[in-house]
Image (spheres, coloured by chain):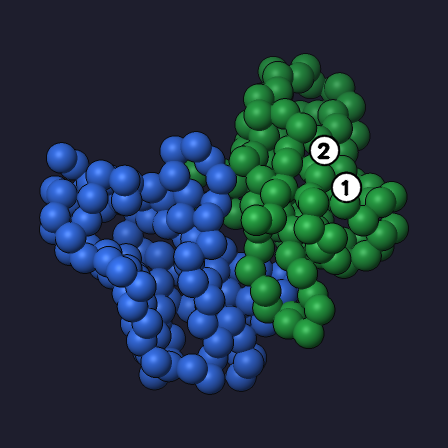
Chain colours: A blue, B green
Amino acid sequence: AQKVTQAQTEISVVEKEDVTLDCVYETRDTTYYLFWYKQPPSGELVFLIRRNSFDEQNEISGRYSWNFQKSTSSFNFTITASQVVDSAVYFCALSHYGQNFVFGPGTRLSVLP
Amino acid sequence: DVKVTQSSRYLVKRTGEKVFLECVQDMDHENMFWYRQDPGLGLRLIYFSYDVKMKEKGDIPEGYSVSREKKERFSLILESASTNQTSMYLCASSSTGGDYNSPLHFGNGTRLTVT
């Protein structure tokens, strides 16, 4: 069975702090994809990144970076120099063949001015 | 950009009513999904469809049905609404093509309240 755990229910930081959102997954598949989505207060989930199980390279996109470690089944997301606009619920998700995405419970991030 | 449109942002219905939630996507995506989102539970898959007139049960299909008569439209039906179906409902679509793991594209969601 596939499962995604996001142990942090809510995180609060002050603007300009760095923050890391944790994601741990379980799967028996050797080929799988991991995703991060952002859900701002408007409600629409926005796709941030996709990573396949064979590519453990870390990725950086502006203030966002992702650390994928197969050895610990983790796919963590770091926001550097956080901003108020980063306030949202963030979801980590796992997919095998794109027809059943398993989502974690989400982490609510509040960035205070 | 992909556009997934859900017909209603907020709905209030009475227990026992038949409820239709509509979703339309404009990118010719093969796959369409219905999720419900509840606090602390994340998103749970209700049904998905990978082709017109095809449907597959997700993790929590009880009390729901779906219809996909046209490729761009995927409807979720609550046959007899109950209070435990009060939730946020999210529609999503994705492309298959040569990539079975293309990301989901979501609509804005429909917040349904059943009284």
Q: Tag 1 or tag 2, which sits nearer the N-term?
A: 2
- To which chain does the residue with label 2 belong? B
Q: Chain of mark 1?
A: B
Q: Position of residue A101 (x, y in %)?
A: 57, 60
Residue denoted by label 1: B73
Q: SS of the residue at dot 2?
A: loop
The answer to whether the residues at label 2 and label 1 have Cβ atoms under 8 Å apart is yes
Residue B113 x, y percent position in the rendering:
58, 21
Residue B112, can we see it?
Answer: no
Q: Residues within 10 Å of mark 2 (few under 14, many from 20)?
A: some
Q: In the rendering, at what x and y percent does residue B71 appear?
A: 81, 49
Residue topped by disc 2: B22
Q: Is residue A98 left or right of residue A35?
A: right
Labels 2 and 1 share a subunit: yes
Say whether residue B15 is left or right of residue B9.
Answer: right
The number of callouts visible is 2
Choose between A47 and B38: the one closer to the eye: A47
Q: Amino acid at mark 1?
A: Arg
